[in-house]
């Protein structure tokens, strides 16, 4: 299979754990550290795996090779123009069976836990409530979730793999969840789900690249915006405007929680020639698109939108197919950016 590395255990680079005398990066993303290369086939996934220069160079070459031949310019615009149709077809075909529930959600993003479920310190809770009181807007207090003391928005929520874990966590609290996607099929799947509850959640169709249509809540009214594997689906030339728009929805002190594909992830290296739209941006066979970010790009996107960095990490893992003895390098970005208090 393309993009996979067949390696012996000895060829794997790793970071020794602190207890074993080495240093582990100060990252919360999983704690299974491969300290003895001979153990590589003992688990399906290892965390904080560093690449050797040689591995990095190999990945760079592979990405260079698969981007040599670009999708013809005259065909390119349809992937952007008709993106919502490709995603509609995707959800038509896969329903809600494709993505797994985001079980890491509350471990990596405890900020999602509303204050009244113990997710925030009292001081932070007070700050949050003060900023609700500071809201000045023309919206009548009749919009969905207007009563809430803690508001979360998930953009590009798909079939709800984060939505339902969040709904089931915030039920009974003072929090409210908004979620949107430009695929009406995806939103329908959410609205028909037995756990969907309009008392806690409002799901709506919205293209986050469209700056002209309003959101069903006032600007500067959100505590958290969750952006999980969504910016990668958007043309990189649009990403900055999207992030700026999202920043405008946050209260002061509110946060964007971001997770997405990182540069040279296995899924980038697996693309075949002729699927590349522009550097590090590809179209899949089904017409959906994906971009692969670097840490600097993520930082530039969020800081240019006036947000300050709380976390910006590359989550590098080694995925192991123990049956086939295949090792695969995965790279994801994980970041948290906050809107400063004035
Ligand atoms: C890879 S899926 C991720 C879905 C979900 N966030 C998850 O983690 O399971 C990308 C999602 O982003 C949505 N999306 C892509 N571009 C969008 C846009 N411009 N506006 C709103 N949603 C968008 C797609 O419809 C799709 O549901």
Image: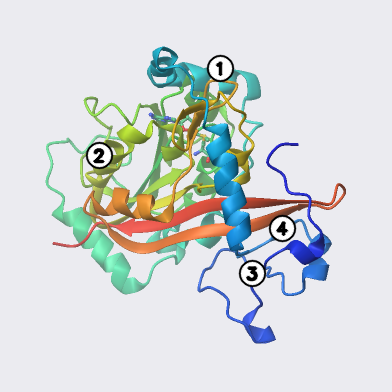
SS category of the residue bearing label 4: strand
- Residue receiving disc 1: 89
Q: Mark 3: is the Cβ under 8 angstroms from ligand 1?
A: no
Q: Is residue 339 left or right of residue 65?
A: left
Question: Where is 138 relative to 310, above or below?
Answer: above
- Which of label 4 and label 2 is nearer to you? 4
Of residue 225 and residue 290, the one placed in the foreground of this image is 290
Q: Residues within 10 Å of mark 1 (few under 14, many from 20)?
A: some
Residue drawn at x 72%, y 74% as measured from the top left: 35
- Residue receiving disc 3: 31
SS category of the residue bearing label 1: helix
Q: Earlier in the sequence, mark 4 or mark 2?
A: 4
Q: Is residue 197 left or right of residue 174?
A: right
Residue drawn at x 51%, y 19% as measured from the top left: 86
Residue drawn at x 64%, y 32% as measured from the top left: 98
**Residue 286 pos. (x, y %):** 58, 20
Mark-to-mark CA distance, 1 and 4: 31 Å
Mark-to-mark CA distance, 4 and 2: 36 Å
- Residue receiving disc 2: 245
- Residue receiving disc 4: 45
Q: Earlier in the sequence, mark 3 or mark 1?
A: 3
**Residue 308 pos. (x, y %):** 27, 60
Q: Quadrant of the N terminus?
A: top right
């Amino acid at each position: 299979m393309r993009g996979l590395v067949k390696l012996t255990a000895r060829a794997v680079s790793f970071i020794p754990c602190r207890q074993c005398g080495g240093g582990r990066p100060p990252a919360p993303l999983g704690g299974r550290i491969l300290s003895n290369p001979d153990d590589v086939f003992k688990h399906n996934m290892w965390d904080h795996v560093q690449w050797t220069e040689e591995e990095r160079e190999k990945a760079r070459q592979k990405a260079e090779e698969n981007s040599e031949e670009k999708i013809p310019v005259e065909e390119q615009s349809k992937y952007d123009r008709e993106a919502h149709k490709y995603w509609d077809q995707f959800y038509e075909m896969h329903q809600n069976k494709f993505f797994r529930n985001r079980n890491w959600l509350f471990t990596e993003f405890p900020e999602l836990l509303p204050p009244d479920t113990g997710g925030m310190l009292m001081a932070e809770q007070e700050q949050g409530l003060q900023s609700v009181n500071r809201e000045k807007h023309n919206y009548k207090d009749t919009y969905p979730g207007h009563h809430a003391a803690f508001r979360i928005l998930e953009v590009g929520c798909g079939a709800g793999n984060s939505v339902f874990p969040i709904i089931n966590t915030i039920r009974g609290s003072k929090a409210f969840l908004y979620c949107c996607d430009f695929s009406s099929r995806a939103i329908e799947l959410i609205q028909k789900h037995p756990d969907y509850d309009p008392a806690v959640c409002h799901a709506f169709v919205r293209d986050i690249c469209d700056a002209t249509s309003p959101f069903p809540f006032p600007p500067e009214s959100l505590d958290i915006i969750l952006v999980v594997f969504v910016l990668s689906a958007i043309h990189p030339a649009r990403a900055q405007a999207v992030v700026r728009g999202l920043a405008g929805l946050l209260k002061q002190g509110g946060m964007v929680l971001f997770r997405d594909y990182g540069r040279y992830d296995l899924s980038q290296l697996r693309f075949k020639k002729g699927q590349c739209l522009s550097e590090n941006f590809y179209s899949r066979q089904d017409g959906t698109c994906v971009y692969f970010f670097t840490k600097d790009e993520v930082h530039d996107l969020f800081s240019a939108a006036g947000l300050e960095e709380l976390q910006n990490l590359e989550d590098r893992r080694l995925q192991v197919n123990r049956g086939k003895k295949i090792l695969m390098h995965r790279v994801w970005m994980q970041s948290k950016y906050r809107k400063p208090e004035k």
